[in-house]
Each structure stands twice: as structure tokens, then as C-alpha cells.
Amino acid sequence: MNRSFFDKAAECFPDSCFKSAPDLGIVLGSGWGDALEMDDVLVRVSYADIAGFGPSSVQGHAGEFILYRRGARRIAAWCGRHHWYEGLGWEPVVFPVEMLRRMGCGSVLLTNAAGGIDDALRPGDFVVLKDHVNTAGVNPLIGPHNSEWGPRFPDMSEVYSKRGQELLCAGAYRLGLRVLRGTYAFTAGPCYETPSEVQAFKRLGADVVGMSTVPEATFARACGFKTAALSLVSNLATGIAQHPLGHEEVMAAGEAAKPQMRALIDDFISRL
């Protein structure tokens, strides 16, 4: 990855973003755009005003960075993400995590909408990630090594923090939400998976499937972050669902689950 991309983009943020480390970074995926409770907004930066970054091309991604306070916590939220399938390279995909690293933040919560593979899942359920399967065969660490981003060969035995998993699961139980701790299969996209691919992912141990999160989580792990990740099951995966899939279904599921999303993220923040 090109370090100068991040250097130029960082200049688009106020100095105040780098003077006091956020307690948590959050990346909001498809359908999660209005899932934050904020007491005091400190900084807003539109993605359109960030050099080389720009707004996401995907519906449901607001395209805004917000630094805010919630209770005693200082939170840096990325309302929307870029995906590998947009063809812009890895820099925009991992940009939120790299900026969090530069801000001194060491913890991140990644969210997404995913297709349900596990037989017990239904739309509206939540899955706390315990592991992932990278079926795309690519990741942002491929290329010349930069020691700022961790070791050349980072350990991946615990990408998702066990404490983060416990906090999210406990919060879901307290709120009476249906939750599973599971494994996420990452595909490059933008096409949805085939029925045969879904069956293969299931045999590999995947519970949900989607087109995001794993690149950021891989990069965050290499950089030493404590990472938690949360999927909203927006639809059943191809071959399990008995109808063609579309992004409209993802957006509708996110809208229906908005109160639960807000409550779960707020509970997580309060117990950090």
C-alpha cells in the first residue's frame, strides 16, 4: 500500500483528532448508518472532503467521519466503508483503521450486513464474529512490508478479541436479542455467492457470508488492535433463500433492526 495516500488524507482532518486518542473506533457497514447515540459531536468530516478517499459508491453508507462523546467515552466513527470490489485498491478499504492507528486508538468495532448460512439464523439476528475464512485469497498486507503496520507475518490466531466477543454477546442477551457467535466467510464481491459456494463455505465452518470486514480486521490485527466485529443477518444466503438476492433486502433489514443496533452498540460502549 502507498503510505503517501494516508499522509495526504490525514491532512484533511483537524489537529484535534490526533491530540487525544479515541477510546473506540467504529466502522458502520451497510444498513448501520444511523446506529449511533451521541451526546456531543466534536468533529465531522465528509468523506467527499478527504483527499483520495471520497464517498462510498454503495447505497446505505452515509460517507462521514464523526468524532463524538458518549458518556465518558470518546468515539471515532466511520459512517460507511469502501470495499475491495470497488476497484480502488486497498488504501480506501483500510483507511479508517489506519487513521484510528494514527489517532492513537487501539480498539475497533467493525459492523456489517451479512447473509446467513447457519441453519439456525434468520434475518434480523446478530452474529458476533469469533473467526473468519478469507475465500478471496487476497488481503491488504500483500506487498512491500511497512513495519508501522506490524510484523511481516502477523499471527491470526485471535483476530477478534475474546473480551469484545463476550461484551457483545452479553449485551445482546441483556437486550433480549437473538445472537450467535460465529465465523464469517469473506468474498471479493460484488456478485453474491452461488449456491455451491455457500455449501462449500458451510463445510469450511462459516456461519455468515459477506464482502467486507475481513480486510479491515486483518489489517487491524497486524497493527495490534483489539478488534470486535458484529454482523446483522440481513438475508439468508444464496441457495438457502428461495428467491434472488438484492441490496434492497439488505437495506430493509437494516432499517427494521435500527433500534436493536443502536441499543447493542450503546451497551458495548458503556461497558468498555
Image: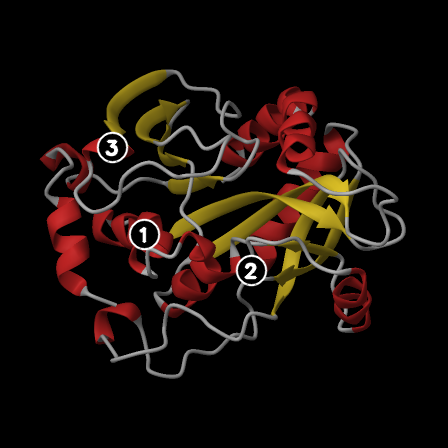
Residue at 29 percent of width and 58 percent of height? 91
> Mark 2 belongs to which amino acid?
Tyr
Question: Which is nearer the eye, 197 or 160?
Answer: 197
Which image quarter: residue 186? bottom right
Q: Are marks 1 and 2 in contact (CB under 8 Å)?
A: no
**Of the residues under marks 2 and 3, which one precedes in the sequence?**
3
Q: Counting other residues with Cα less than 10 Å from the Cα at mark 2, is it few (<14), some (14-19), or many (20 or more)?
A: many
Q: CA distance from mark 1 to mark 2?
A: 22 Å
Residue at 63 percent of width and 64 percent of height? 131
> Mark 1 belongs to which amino acid?
Pro
Look at the image and tell me in which quarter the N terminus lies.
bottom left
Res. 48 mark: 3
Residue at 73 percent of width and 42 percent of height? 245
- The relative height of residue 260 versus residue 188 in the rendered view (above or below) is above
Q: How many marks?
A: 3
Res. 160 mark: 2
